[in-house]
Image (tube, grey):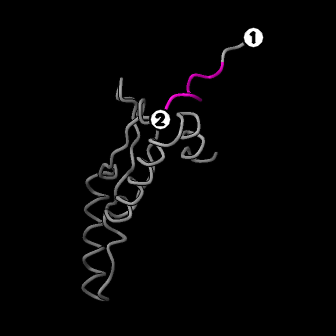
């Protein structure tokens, strides 16, 4: 007889934490995006879509090991995603959280 998966009973927020980080990209790529974004803004009143965005990063509290990293968009969108993630961490088990948030594939 196998014991139940302990992750199915453990609240995810007791094991995992979420935060936002600047998106990982090379300095050259980041510079090109910033310059392009400003050029578009000057010409058309543009947008900040080309600016380097944020990543949502979920790590284990005990080891700091990264469990999940997903693109979270620009700061306002990223903040909404962070709040939703923290709510899910508080309400779901570890297994439920991983199943809900891990990208398919």
Q: Where does the image place residue 95, in percent across and percent down from the top left? A: 58, 34
Q: Where does the image place residue 68, in percent across and percent down from the top left? A: 46, 40
The residue pinned by badge 2 equals 12
Q: Where does the image place residue 22, in percent across and percent down from the top left? A: 29, 52
Q: Residues within 10 Å of mark 2 (few under 14, many from 20)?
A: many
Determine whether the residue tagged by mark 2 lies in a helix, strand or loop.
helix
The residue pinned by badge 1 equals 1
- Mark 1 and mark 2: span between their CA atoms? 26 Å
- Identify the disc placed on residue 51: none
Residue pictured at 34% horizontal, 60% vertical: 53
Instruction: Work out whether 62 lies above or below 59.
Output: above
Instruction: Work out whether 32 lies above or below 4.
Output: below
User: What segment is highlighted magenta in the picture?
Assistant: 4-12
- The reply, left or right, for residue 68 in relation to residue 1 is left
Q: Quadrant of the N terminus?
A: top right
- Residue 81 falls inside the magenta stretch: no
Determine whether the residue tagged by mark 1 lies in a helix, strand or loop.
loop
Q: Where does the image place residue 94, in percent across and percent down from the top left? A: 53, 33
């Amino acid at each position: 007889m196998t014991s139940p998966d302990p992750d199915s009973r453990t609240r995810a927020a007791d094991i995992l934490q979420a935060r936002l980080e600047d998106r990982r990209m090379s300095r050259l790529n980041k510079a090109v995006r910033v310059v392009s974004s400003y050029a578009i803004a000057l010409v058309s009143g543009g947008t900040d879509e080309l600016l380097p965005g944020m990543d949502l990063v979920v790590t284990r509290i005990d080891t700091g090991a990264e469990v999940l990293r997903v693109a979270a968009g620009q700061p306002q969108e990223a903040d909404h995603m962070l709040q939703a993630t923290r709510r899910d961490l508080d309400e779901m088990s570890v297994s439920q959280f991983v199943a809900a948030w891990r990208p398919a594939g």
